[in-house]
Amino acid sequence: MRKRDIVLMAYNNLWRRKARTVLTCLGVLIGTASIIVMLSIGIGFKQTMERDMARWGSLNIIRIHPGMSYDEYGNPSGEEHRLNDDTVSELKNIPGVVAVSPAFQVHGEARLGRKNGWLDIVGVDLDTLEDLEFSVSDGRLPTAEERFTIVAGSQVINNFWDERASRMGGFHQGPPPEQDPSELLNQRISVSIFNQSNPEKRKNYNFMVVGILDEKNMEHAWQVFGSLDDIKRIHEFMVKESSGSGAASSGGMITMSRVVPMEKSVSSKRRSKMEDTRNDYNFILVRTKDVAQTKKVSAELRERGYNAYSMADSLEGIEKISKTIQAVLGGIGSITLFVAFIGITNTMIMSIYERTREIGIMKVIGASFADVKALFLAEASLIGLIGGALGLAFSYLVSAIINEITAEYMQSGMMGAGPPGNISVIPVWLAAFAVVFAILIGLGSGLYPANRAIKLSPIVAIRNE
Amino acid sequence: MKPIIKSENIIKKYRMGSQVVPVLKGIDLNIYPGETLCILGTSGSGKTTFLNLAAGLERPTKGRIIIEGYNLNKISEKNMAAFRRKYIGFVFQLYNLLPALTALENAVLPLIFEGVPSREREKKGRELLKQMGLGNRLRHKPGELSGGQRQRVSIARALINNPRIIFADEPTGNLDSKTTVEILKLLTDTVRENGQTMLLVTHDDKVAGYADRIVHMVDGNIYNGNAN
Ligand SMILES: Nc1ncnc2c1ncn2[C@@H]1O[C@H](COP(=O)(O)OP(=O)(O)OP(=O)(O)O)[C@@H](O)[C@H]1O
Ligand SMILES: [Mg+2]
């Protein structure tokens, strides 16, 4: 028998019993749709979480801070590493690492025209800015050839306020109004840096803002970034022990910078043994090829004793949650589809009872086992296909409705997080998988009836009664 | 001449609960190529049972049937359909057409199972139905045809793939006498024209008159010539 004839015959047989076919297909439709929608929610959840996380720090970047790494029981793992050039070259040699930039971080009072404020300045290797996923919404990135040019995070402008304006306005009601980040572009900011051990000592530096970072990565939103060399010099001045006062600074002003331990300055003997780490980098940024590499390298670094952290590390938890959600929701959908499976089987068995005579005639006339089986399987698969395809269409509708409804809730709930992610996402693979699965369900549920049809004895079937 | 169908000591018994009912009690029968043989017998004598065995629809309790040199006992259930499709055409008392299909579709059903392309089989079916006098009933469903017309469709179906053998079980059992004559003439003439062999089964003397040779079946036994 030709395939075309099998499908045509199966189709005609289904069409003969419209009501029953429609009801059976409806079962498959609901089953498929519930699986698709349930899984789409799990997928949407994961995607939304990943996107939200990417806003708070790139998933491809690892930060290494001074200090040690501790395992889950609080025991130190590996040995402590200094953040110096040796470390930088060690990091560069780790497979999967694309770029490494050491960083100094300083902090000072700042003036921008009439406005006062403060500035958190990070010096990085400007050649690696693009690799570290810095991108501007306005202006450009500073280059390594320049001196004292910076690119500012999108929120930096909100570190500044106009004292006269606020004095005139009296008390503020609520938070200060948001300021336009592009106000900073091509402006000069002057910063006063204090020596940590002697706050009497201070130096002024002038910076030129050449670009404003976009809002993709909120981790950078409150900082400005300049050349490593410039900031290194400022940092040196900041941590230099002032000759006058022997007392060690508490270093409270810059939380990120390494605090000189007490005993170092107290015992000169020990000082010679212990290394002076004051001029070590404040932290190091490591860019890896992709999220998978980030997770791997990040774990590896911690094993070596580095105090390393990446946003990607938290992904695992989210993936676990999303998998659980998908399993639970998918399970609910599967039950529905299983009911549909029974529905198809039932329909096909009924249809065999009705068509006992027909099947017998076909066999007498020369339909082979394969023909009879193919006919029944084709009918069952067609139900699966029709139900699955309609179920898919229905899922897109339901998914759109879910997203529409949740979008309304989210808009009021999440502040300034941009457009809310879709809570239900149907990727192409899920759509294809669902339809194929529905067909297989049809095929599977047709197996038993088809085998029964084969076993029907033709004479019993054609006996004149 | 070598028989095309050879029945050797066919015995068929049915088990009814604890009872065993002997239906065929040792049938020896030769049917020769090109002849139309009629098995004449009263109701319940075992005619249909014999036909079913000869068509491989049922297995004998004992004995064997050889068609075209093939021992039916040796052909598996699975291959029997292909065997029937190739060698045997069926005409039933109750037509046994598929109600959902048109006259044309019913007539070409064996060709569909054989995998003949639709254009080719439709052409064949249309020609044959025209020959059966149904040229203007091609698209009718069985329910929209008279008994005689239905039997013509069923004859067309039996002949469509030009089998060597036709089995006809009471082909006119449900028809009035005028139609009976028409159908029997059509059937026997066509079979003779094609040089096919036909096994015709009936309880009606008049029907038997259209055959070349008559054997009698009485209570599960075959008698040549006059029976009593
Ligand atoms: N499957 C079966 N189980 C038990 N007995 C059967 C079975 N099939 C046929 N018989 C018996 O075999 C006998 C012959 O039946 P068969 O149908 O061959 O008769 P027939 O000659 O074709 O009669 P009719 O002219 O009425 O069609 C009957 O007595 C019937 O009861
Ligand atoms: Mg009979």
Image (cartoon, helix red, strand yellow):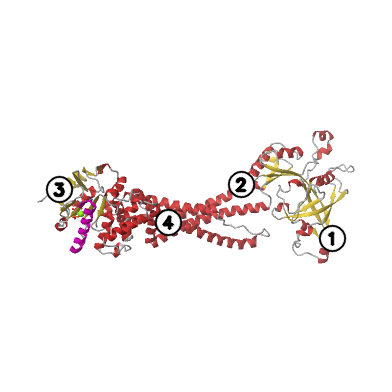
Question: Could you tell me if residue B133 is visible in this image?
Answer: yes
Give the Cα separation between the discs numbered 3 and 4. Answer: 51 Å
For mark 3, what is the residue? B221
Q: Nearer the viewer, residue B61 or A49?
A: B61
Q: Nearer the viewer, mark 3 or mark 1?
A: 3
Q: Give amino acid for label 2.
A: Glu
Numbered circle sitting on residue A383: 4
A103 in the magenta segment:
no
Q: Residues within 10 Å of mark 2 (few under 14, many from 20)?
A: few
Does A118 sit left or right of A45 as displayed?
right
Question: Could you tell me if residue B172 is visible in this image?
Answer: no
Does B9 sit left or right of A58 as displayed?
left
Give the Cα separation between the discs numbered 4 and 1. Answer: 74 Å
Report in which chain the residue with disc 1 lies. Answer: A
For mark 1, what is the residue? A114
The kind of secondary structure element at disc 1 is: loop
The kind of secondary structure element at disc 3 is: strand
Report in which chain the residue with disc 4 lies. Answer: A
Q: Give amino acid for label 4.
A: Ile
